[in-house]
């Protein structure tokens, strides 16, 4: 028996737009089993909460018996998706792509049942495609059609470079849908034009065009731009529980409700109640703690979520040191502060270390140090802290 309430939730929670809504709704109500495509380029080792918005929607479809196709764009990652960007993405090497891909299955398994999904790689067909076939594919779409995209227009307007390979990207993503014979493609709202290309090409290849579901984008830690590995504002679903909890607690208050809707299983009725309570003046921090707990619970389990909450309260409310601090061994000597941060991996570069020190984000044994040239004499048990959550205990 078809559960219409589940279908309603499937088609609404976190959903920005559906093309064609009536067609997709009818297919679901008739009980048709769909082939549902989601593609991701392995541009970094982590899958983040923004990606998980779509993976969690796929899980909802999977629970209703539909066939989920998880497409890893190991070929298209060499180009980089130009959607929403105004600068050229750095092209990845094959080694970088393989390294990033190695972690994907393990992370996806936190959300989807791997035994029931179809995992594909688009190098399967693009590495075998002959030049004649590629040119035949190119002839199906005009440059005018591709250049209608606002992100491409913005680059032209600002006289910024646009690679020919980037122009091909929407065509390649669209052709993936042809090969996979997808009935529905799900992606972020920034992927709409790429997914529409899939519909267009499927029709030209004599297939029924896929329906499209776009999800609202999740803003990252900066509270402004979408969560993205490229912007370094993301929370990976494989992040350690304490780190994940702490990063969620650092989110701007105005994102609490959106994160509840897109990143948790909390019922909408309860979320609406939280929203009303905050409007009446309730402390957002309490609801943010619940949000952090719910998200950590999804990826690490309830016990780890409890431990992470307890640790956060210990460090940030009671102003105590973390119960477990990583140690780093150094010889008994002096280090200039800027060099010390790089040496113990609390800063990726000297320039970043200087920035952190000048901002007052660095403490040595609880004392703020703002002089990046200062000589620090290494002592056993010395605690170096950067920002609110990163600690290192020095050993000799």
Image: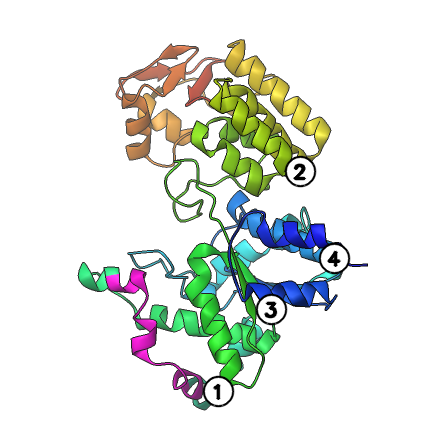
Query: Where is 358 relative to 158, above or below?
Result: above
Q: Nearer the viewer, residue 311 or 291?
A: 291
Q: What residue is pinned by disc 3? A: 23
Q: CA distance from mark 4 to mark 2?
A: 20 Å
Q: Residue at x 55, y 73 (%)?
A: 177
Furthest toward the bottom, the residue is: 132
- Circle nearer the N terminus (2, 1): 1
The answer to which of marks 4 and 2 sits earlier in the sequence is: 4
Secondary structure mainly formed by the magenta segment: helix
Earlier residue among tags 3 and 1: 3
The residue shown at (58%, 75%) is: 124
Please tell me whether residue 78 is drawn above or below residue 201 in the rendered image. Answer: above
The quadrant of the image that shows the N terminus is bottom right
- State the residue at coordinates (40%, 49%): 230
Which one is in front in this view, the residue at disc 4 or the one at disc 3?
3
Q: Which mark is residue 130?
A: 1
Give the secondary structure at mark 1.
loop
Mark 4 and mark 3 lie on one chain; the one further toward the N terminus is: 3
What is the magenta range? 135-153
Find numbered disc 2 in the image and state the secondary structure of the residue it sits on. Answer: helix
Disc 4: which residue = 64
The spot of residue 385 in percent (x, y) is 44, 20
Whole-Å distance between the Cαs marked 2 and 1? 44 Å
Q: Residue at x 53, y 29 (%)?
A: 275
Q: Identify the residue under disc 2.
A: 298
């Amino acid at each position: 028996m078809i559960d219409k309430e589940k279908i309603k939730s499937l088609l609404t929670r976190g959903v920005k737009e559906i093309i064609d809504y009536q067609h997709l709704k009818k297919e679901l109500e008739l009980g048709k089993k769909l082939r549902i495509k989601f593609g991701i380029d392995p541009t970094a080792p982590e899958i983040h909460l923004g990606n998980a918005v779509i993976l969690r929607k796929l899980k909802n479809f999977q629970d209703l018996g539909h066939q989920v196709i998880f497409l890893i764009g190991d070929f298209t990652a060499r180009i980089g998706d130009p959607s929403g960007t105004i600068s050229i993405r750095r092209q990845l090497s094959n080694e970088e792509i393989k390294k990033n891909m190695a972690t994907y299955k393990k992370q996806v398994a936190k959300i989807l049942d791997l035994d029931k999904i179809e995992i594909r790689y688009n190098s399967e067909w693009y590495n075998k495609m002959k030049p004649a076939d590629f040119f035949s594919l190119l002839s199906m779409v005009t440059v005018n059609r591709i250049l209608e995209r606002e992100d491409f227009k913005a680059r032209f307007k600002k006289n910024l470079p646009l690679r020919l390979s980037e122009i091909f990207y929407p065509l390649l993503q669209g052709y993936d849908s042809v090969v996979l014979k997808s009935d529905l493609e799900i992606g972020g709202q920034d992927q709409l034009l790429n997914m529409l290309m899939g519909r267009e090409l499927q029709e030209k290849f004599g297939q029924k065009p896929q329906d499209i579901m776009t999800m609202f984008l999740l803003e990252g830690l900066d509270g402004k731009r979408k969560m993205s590995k490229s912007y370094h504002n993301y929370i990976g679903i494989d992040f350690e529980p304490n780190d994940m909890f702490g990063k969620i607690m650092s989110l701007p208050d105005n994102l609490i409700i959106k994160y509840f809707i897109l990143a948790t299983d909390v019922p909408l009725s309860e979320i609406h109640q939280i929203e009303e309570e905050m409007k009446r003046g309730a402390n957002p921090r309490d609801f943010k703690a619940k949000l952090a707990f719910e998200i950590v619970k999804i990826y690490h389990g309830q016990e780890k979520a409890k431990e992470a909450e307890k640790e956060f309260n210990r460090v940030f409310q009671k102003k105590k040191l973390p119960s477990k601090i990583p140690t780093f061994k150094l010889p008994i000597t002096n280090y200039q502060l800027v060099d010390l941060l790089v040496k113990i991996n609390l800063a990726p570069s000297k320039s970043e270390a200087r920035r952190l020190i000048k901002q007052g984000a660095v403490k040595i044994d609880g004392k703020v140090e703002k002089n990046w040239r200062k000589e620090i004499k290494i002592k056993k048990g010395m605690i170096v802290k950067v920002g609110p959550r990163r600690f290192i205990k020095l050993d000799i």
